[in-house]
Image (cartoon, rainbow, N blue to C red):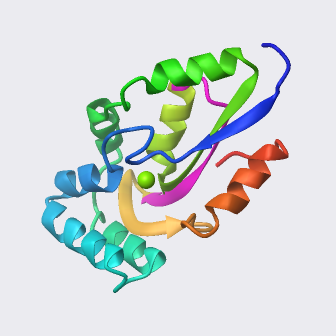
Amino acid sequence: MSQVKGLCVMDVDGTLILEEVIDLLGREAGCEEEISQITSQAMRGELDFESSLSKRVSLLEGLPISVFDKVFNSIHLSPNAQKFISIIQKNGIQVGLVSGGFTSIVERMAKSLGIAYFSANQLEVKDGLLTGKLIGQIINPENKKRYSRTMEKGTATS
Ligand SMILES: [Mg+2]
């Protein structure tokens, strides 16, 4: 690769991809409606991001991790996203993903697009099933910027 000249950090859900992964997971868990109601509450400012995220994630309890194969395969990249990424990479710009979504999808997405850096939220898994909880620090809209800076220093991932 040519010399690195910069870094382009992207959001994932509704930006790099057309879908919101939490909605797709909700569909698999049979609680799509409930999840979209919580999302709407958060959008109206009645619920902060972290509460709304943990509420929605709790509804995913019991989903088998095989669900990520199905969800990953049903995702659509935004028009020209792949082209855009390969053009900027060819021009020496590194790409990173910072997502309030989930590592189980974002990591695969990064690998499939040759993206070096990513940060996302991690769903807890026990015995092959989602526990409905998150592990580690939550990536929310406020700290996305901080994660982007970490990538800039080249110390990122997950
Ligand atoms: Mg988004």
- Residue 139 sits in which quadrant? bottom right
Tell me the quarter of the image containing the N terminus.
top right
Residue 141 in the image, given as x and y percentages of width and height: 54, 66
Residue 38 in the image, given as x and y percentages of width and height: 27, 74
Q: Which residues are magenta?
A: 113-125
**Residue at image x 54%, y 39%?**
107
Residue 106 in the image, given as x and y percentages of width and height: 50, 42
19 is higher (above) or lower (below) than 42: above
- Residue 66 sits in which quadrant? top left
Residue 6 in the image, given as x and y percentages of width and height: 78, 33
Residue 22 seen from this side: yes
**Residue at image x 70%, y 56%?**
147
Residue 155 seen from this side: no
Determine whether, in the image, residue 93 is placed left or right of residue 39.
Answer: right
- Residue 135 sits in which quadrant? bottom right
What secondary structure prevails in the magenta region? strand
